[in-house]
Image (tube, grey):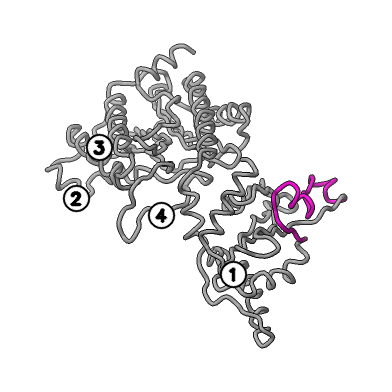
Amino acid sequence: MTAAEYKRRRRALANAIGPNGIAIVPAAREVVRNRDVHYPFRQNSDFVYLTGFAEPDAFAVIAPKRKDGEYVLFCRPRDPEREQWDGRRAGVDGATADFGADQAYPLSELDTVMPTLIDGRERLYFAIGSDAALDAQVMGWVNRVRANIRAGASAPETFVTIESVLHEMRLRKSTAEIKQMRRAAEISAAAHRRLMQICEPGMNESRLETEFHHVCAASGARDQAYSPIVGGGANACILHYVENRAPLRDGDLVLIDAGCELDGYASDITRTFPVNGRFSAPQRELYELVLEAQAAAIGKAKPGNLWNEPHDEAVKVLTKGLIHLGLLKGKLAKLIKDEAHKPYYMHRTGHWLGMDVHDVGSYKQGGAWRPFEPGMVLTVEPGLYLADSDAIPEPYRQIGIRIEDDVLITESGNEVLSAAAPKDPDAIESLMADN
């Protein structure tokens, strides 16, 4: 993202909270994994959305109409000794010169300066309740302002969850964000194609996971948006299966739910294909049912339609199919009303996608499902999970299928960002036959 993009976002936030408001957004902290080893650092999405600043333990402040500048950044100072061990720091000078802060202070001055920024503001926006330590820290600054009321200080009287403003901004992607997400989806789609090409019976699930990482990293996406799911056979019926260490058996399907993160933006793609390169008749029958449900759901993802419409359409198609297969009995309308599909399809058909794989933004407004708007990105991911049960005809047992794509709402309809990952069963078989 360019400096102009981050500046545009900060200006939009400033306009949203108004001249009497102030917003405080913390960076993520480093977290110890064990002893003196840390988990890989990943910046707080709200913080990096506004700043582009990748270092831990920082604070961004947006103070509209402030005389000395609206954007203040607190960060770690330069420290040649620590930088020798842990890597370069921007420092206070870098915060202004390279990251667009109007003013910057070292973290050692946080408790001194922050009350002066809060003084005189009526509304304080921050992530209330998300972190007890942050809540206490913010209230400490507010109480320091209150302690000086007799000297003319004025503390905020209204506290607002910043998510109500900032997450609505993040829900609608800019042109620059869409470009980034399109590229992330392309990289992940290429990795899914590669897995179809190398898969064979006897291979371990972990081999496919490793290859997915490799293809993404080689294309510039070193990080994954979430822990990959590689489930062969019955393992595909476990929605969040992440062990990924079982052998892949001839005659089984393998479900792969994996997506890279590219410069802070997630992709999220699921493909299901035969380990040996050929769908059996029962596998193809179930697969084509899920594919039909996904196509129907994607058709409902367009401006003006409501969030629940893709899910409702997928449920309708799947329920019809389950009746045809003999897995459900009764009238379609009543089965849908009773949610009779849930033993076989127990999750929703999608979620918002962006900087977080389960991205921010409300699904309802005023108690009603919200309509789609251009710039929103969602996943569409129906599935069927037929575990080993006497209630399921034997040819369909231990089959788990999910097909998931990343879908951008456009002015005229939608764009499937992940379309380069094959999902037509004939196309899958053709690709696998060429390996």
Amino acid beneath label 2: Lys
Q: Horizontal and vertical percent for residue 258?
A: 50, 35
Which callout, 1 or 3, points to the residue nearer the camera? Answer: 1
Magenta segment: does it hold 61?
no
Residue 419 position by quadrant: top left
Compared to 412, does 371 lie above or below? below
Which callout, 1 or 4, points to the residue nearer the camera? Answer: 4
Write the start and end of the magenta stretch as one range.
81-105
Q: Residues within 10 Å of mark 4 (few under 14, many from 20)?
A: some
- Placement of the N terminus among the 4 image quadrants: top right
Q: As drawn, which residue projects farthest toward the top?
A: 434
Q: Which residue is mark 2?
A: 337
Q: CA distance from mark 3 to mark 2?
A: 14 Å
Amino acid beneath label 3: Leu
Q: Earlier in the sequence, mark 1 or mark 4?
A: 1
Amino acid beneath label 1: Asp
Q: Residues within 10 Å of mark 3 (few under 14, many from 20)?
A: many
Q: Earlier in the sequence, mark 2 or mark 1?
A: 1
Who is closer to the viewer here, 155 or 111?
155
Q: Which residue is mark 4?
A: 362
Q: Which residue is mark 1?
A: 135
Q: Are marks 3 and 2 in contact (CB under 8 Å)?
A: no
- Could one spot residue 343 in this view of the protein? no
Q: CA distance from mark 1 to mark 3?
A: 46 Å
Element on which disc 3 rests: helix
Which callout, 2 or 1, points to the residue nearer the camera? Answer: 1
- Could one spot residue 326 in this view of the protein? yes
Compared to 62, does 388 lie above or below? above
Q: CA distance from mark 4 to mark 2?
A: 25 Å
Magenta segment: does it hold 86?
yes
